[in-house]
Amino acid sequence: MSPPHVLVLTCDHDPHADRVRHLLAGRGARTTVFDNGDYLTRAHVELAYTTRGLARRLLHTESGTLDLDSLTALWWRRPRPPGAHPAITDPSVAVYTAQESANLITDLWEHLPCRTVPARESMLQRAGHKPSQLILAAELGFEIPETLIATQADALWDFHNRHDGHIITKPLGMPWVENLAEGHTVIRKCDFVSARDLAYAEALRFCPVIAQQYVPKRLELRVTVVGRRVFAAEIHSQNSNQARVDWRRYDLAVTPHHVHRLPDEVARRCLAMTDRLGLAFGAFDLVLTPDGRYVFLEINPEGQWLWIERLTGLPISEAVCDLLLEGA
């Protein structure tokens, strides 16, 4: 019997993928890593059909040829999108060929006859929409922050006044803007709305953002769901001036991380949400308020966990490995 074979879709320098691949190898499984961004430059796909249907699906890479129908699991980590071949210099042709490549690669991974973790790309895209997440979380019984998504300055000013200025903004989807003037990259996180920000509120007409009532924090929680297992870690972000508004500003030296005992009811809501979104994996961001309420912020279908594992000992990578081998 052939050993399990997992295809990992990710970019270069992904320590999460490296960690899980090491564990998979220890269990006798094979892994192949592929980045969608390498299509046409370092890899090629071959699909063939007879008059009766599909005959073969092959992925040709620098390391050899992979029969895609032999895979036991596909792990969608963090691949880059396909791009145009560098030999194409006409911008319009480059856009066209990149889109055609994306059409092929996207459809290819949608229909492989193997387990896909966390989900197929179409489901991942839907699951990542924050407005829909808030609706679903409330339906499942989570408390959510009062939220405004608008492109009118008046709406933001009214929202700011209604909450006595205690509001934050965060990006709707894209957390960064690359290749600005002089090659700079701007990363958007969760930030308080200042008086200076309000002075530029008219700029909302160019791009929507999420504005939310600021939720007071005793702790922030990173809850990672892997299959039917729930791993909860508490982040003492209020110990750090740098991380107190958004723990992703990382001040690990003064921000303790510990295993958190999540109430069963909250864990069930997390599992119900991943089920409704069609996900086998999800990283939840929650807040535990000073008066003991658990408030939902968002779920990331492709969230990171390695730093949580290192600081708390939670065996999340082992659980991902279990999931990829389940039923193999």
Image (spheres, grey):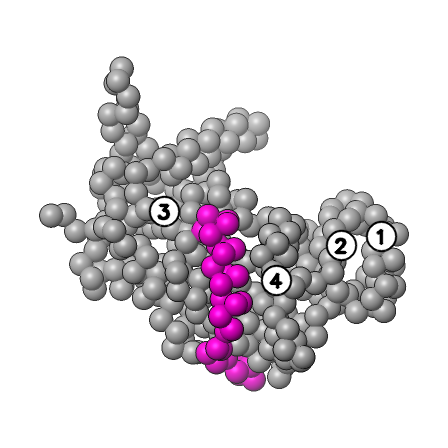
As for residue 270 lying within the magenta part, the answer is yes
Circle 4 SS class = loop
**Callout 1, which amino acid?**
Ala
- The residue segment tinted magenta is 252-279
Q: Are marks 1 and 4 in contact (CB under 8 Å)?
A: no
Give the label on residue 155, or none.
Answer: 1
Q: Which residue is mark 2?
A: 148
Q: Which residue is mark 4?
A: 142
Circle 1 SS class = helix
Circle 3 SS class = strand
Q: Is residue 217 above or below residue 99?
A: below
**Callout 4, which amino acid?**
Phe
Q: Quadrant of residue 120?
A: top left
Q: CA distance from mark 1 to mark 4?
A: 25 Å
Q: CA distance from mark 4 to mark 2?
A: 18 Å
Q: Residue at x 83, y 55 (%)?
A: 156
Question: Which of the marked residues, 4 or 2, is nearer the chain's N terminus?
Answer: 4
Q: Is residue 234 above or below residue 88?
A: below
Q: Residue at x 83, y 59 (%)?
A: 159
| Pair 1/4: label in front | 4
Mark 1 neighbour density, 10 Å: few (under 14) some (14–19) many (20 or more): few
Tell whether 132 sits left or right of 76. right
Mark 4 neighbour density, 10 Å: few (under 14) some (14–19) many (20 or more): many
Question: Which of the marked residues, 1 or 2, is nearer the chain's N terminus?
Answer: 2
Circle 2 SS class = strand
Q: x, y percentage for residue 211?
A: 74, 58
Q: Which residue is mark 3?
A: 116
